[in-house]
Amino acid sequence: MTTYLVTGGCGFIGSNFILRLLREHRDARVINLDKLTYAGNPDNLREVEQDEGYRFVEGDACDPTLVGELVQQADVIAHFAAESHVDRSLMESGAFITTEVLGTYTLLEAARHNPKLKRFLHVSTDEVYGDVAEGQFSVETDPLRPRSPYAASKAGAEMQVIAYVETYGLPVVVARPGNNVGPRQHLEKFVPLCTTNAMDDRPLPLYGDGRQQRDWLFVEDNIEALDILLHEGEPGEVYNVGAKNHRYNIDVAEAILDLLGKPKSLIRFVEDRAGHDRRYGVDYGKISKLGWSPSHDFEAAIEKTVRWYEENRWWWEAVREGEFKEYYEKQYGQRLADARPYTSGGS
Ligand code: NAD
Ligand code: TYD
C-alpha cells in the first residue's frame, strides 16, 4: 500500500493525475488536499468520490498543522496546488506568492520531518525560463528568467525546493511541463475559452497579433510523465516535459473553429497581455531517457480536448455561471468592446 498526498487535486492536472493513480496503481491510497479556490472543482473527481482508496481533505497548503498531519501519513507527495493563471496574476499577485512560495515551503518543512517519505514531486512549469526565441529549446540547466508574477512565484517555489534538497537531502523531483490541454481545464485558459465561446457563437479573444507560440502538451501525456518522475525520477533532479507541438495562438483558434464547424469571423484581436511571453519551448531529452515520450501530436490533442468540451457541457456551463462571469467581464469587457475583427492571414 502506498499513500499519495496530492495537493491541488481538484484542479485540471491534479484531478487527471489522481484518476490515473487510482486507475494504474492498484495499491494506491490517495489523500487530496485542496483549498477549493475558484479553480478547484469537486466535479472533477466525482467518479472516484466513493472509492475506498480516495480521501478528500478541504484545506490550505499553507496551513502547517494540517499539512504536518497529512504529510506524516504519506509515502509520497505530488504537489500541484497553485494559483495557475497568468492573467489573474497581472490583476493581483499576492495569492500567487502565498500559495506557490509559502505553500511549497509548508510542504517541504513537513516533509523533512517524515523520515519514511520516499519521493516528493514538485510540479513547476516551463514558464520559469521566460520567453524563449523561435528555434531555441530550454534545457534544465538554463537560468530561470521568469517574466510574469505567476512565473516568478513558481520560480520562487523552485528555489525553496532546491534549498531543501541541498540542505536536508529531501528526495524531491521537479517537473517543468509545457502548456497542457485536455479535459477539465478551467474556462479561463485559452483553449477551453475558445472552445466554449465558439460552441455558443461568442467571440474568441486573441491577445495582440495572435502570433505567440505555446507547446501544447496533452494532459494524459503530461500525467504519464509525472507518474514516471514520481516513481523513477532521480531525487534532486529537474525534468522538462514537452511535446514539440508548437503552434501560434491564431492557428490554435482556427483549428478549434474548424473542428466545431464555426466561422473564422468569431476571432477578435484584443489588447495584448502585459509582458506577454511570445514563446516557450523545452528540450525534453532528459525525461526521454526514462522511456517517456508524448503520444499525442497537436491535432490529436486539440481534437480530443474539443470533443470532451462538446460532450460535457454540464461541466463547463456550471463553471461559466459562477465566479467566472465577473472575471470575464473584468478581463474581456473593454477588450472586446475595442476589438479588431479577424482578417484572413492574421491581425
Ligand atoms: P488549476 O488552477 O486548475 O488547479 C489548481 C488547484 O490548486 C485547484 O484545485 C485549487 O483549488 C488548488 N489550490 C490553490 N491554492 C491552494 C492552496 N493554497 N492550498 C490547497 N489547494 C490550493 O491548475 P492546473 O492547471 O491543474 O495546474 C496544476 C499545477 O501544474 C500548478 O502547479 C501549475 O503551476 C502547474 N502547471 C500547469 C500547466 C497548465 O498548462 N495548466 C502547465 C505547467 C505547469
Ligand atoms: P493561457 O492558456 O492563459 O496559458 P499561458 O499564459 O500560461 O501560456 O494562454 C495561452 C496563450 O493564449 C498565451 O499566449 C496567451 C493567449 N491567450 C489569448 O490570446 N487570449 C486569451 O483570452 C487567453 C486566456 C490567452
Image (cartoon, rainbow, N blue to C red):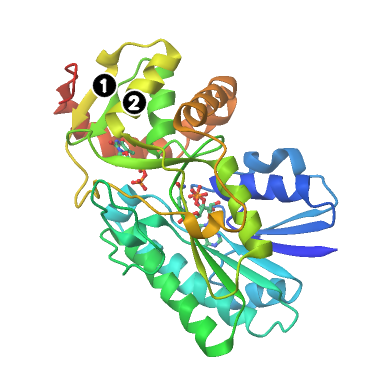
Q: Residue at x 70, y 46 (%)?
A: 20
Kind of element beneath mark 2: helix
Mark 1: give few (<14), some (14-19) or many (20+) Cα within 10 Å. Answer: many
Q: Is residue 10 in view from this perspective?
A: no
Q: Quadrant of residue 60?
A: bottom right
User: Closer to the camera: disc 2 or disc 1?
Assistant: 2
- Image position of 65 (left or right of 144): right
Residue at 47% across, 28% down: 302
Question: Which residue extends farthest bottom?
Answer: 167
Q: x and y percent of residue 162 in the render? A: 47, 78
Mark 2 and mark 1 in contact? Answer it, CB < 8 Å.
Answer: yes
Q: Which mark is residue 296?
A: none
Q: In terms of secondary structure, where does tag 1 sit?
A: strand
Comparing 232 with 183, the one in front is: 232
Per the image, the residue denoted by label 2 is 253
Q: Position of residue 11 (x, y in %)?
A: 55, 48
Say above or below: 261 vs 25. above
Q: Residues within 10 Å of mark 2 (few under 14, many from 20)?
A: many
The amino acid beneath tag 2 is Ala
First along the sequence among labels 2 and 1: 2
Identify the mark at residue 267; answer none if there is no mark.
Answer: 1
How far is mark 2 from mark 1, CA to CA? 8 Å
Q: Is residue 3 left or right of residue 90?
A: right
Q: Position of residue 270 (x, y in %)?
A: 19, 32
- Does any atom of ligand 2 lie closer than 8 Å to the CB of label 2? yes
Which quarter of the image is occupied by the C terminus? top left
Q: Residue at x 85, y 63 (%)?
A: 1
